[in-house]
Amino acid sequence: MRRAKKYFSFFGILISTCFEKLHIFYSKLIEYLRKLPNIHMKLLNIELKPIKTDLINNN
């Protein structure tokens, strides 16, 4: 019975740390996905500079 308790406590700790790691990963993923629309809007707000036609016409 003692040996069984040791194994159960070991696996209990292992499972709880795995769930904690998954929770941290999930929260970072959600945070990343929330930032995506902001990144998209920043990319849309970039002004495109006109191509210099002088360089093209000179060649």
Image: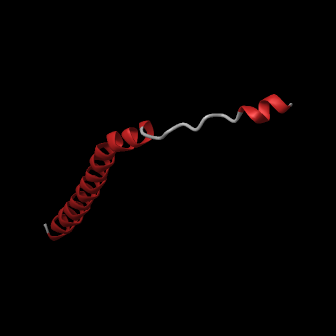
Measured from the top left, where is residue 32 in percent x and y? Answer: 33, 48
Q: Residue furthest left?
A: 1
Depth check: 33 or 14 in front? 33
**Color theme of the render:** secondary structure
Location of the C terminus by quadrant is top right
x 49%, y 39%: residue: 47
Depth check: 44 or 32 in front? 44
Q: Residue furthest right?
A: 59
Measured from the top left, where is residue 35 in percent x and y? Answer: 32, 46
x 66%, y 34%: residue: 51
Q: Quadrant of residue 45?
A: top left
Measured from the top left, where is residue 7 in percent x and y? Answer: 22, 64
Number of numbered labels in the structure image: 0
Q: Is residue 26 left or right of residue 55?
A: left
Depth check: 17 or 32 in front? 32
x 19%, y 61%: residue: 12
Q: Is residue 59 left or right of residue 26?
A: right
x 31%, y 48%: residue: 29
Q: Quadrant of residue 41?
A: top left
Location of the N terminus by quadrant is bottom left
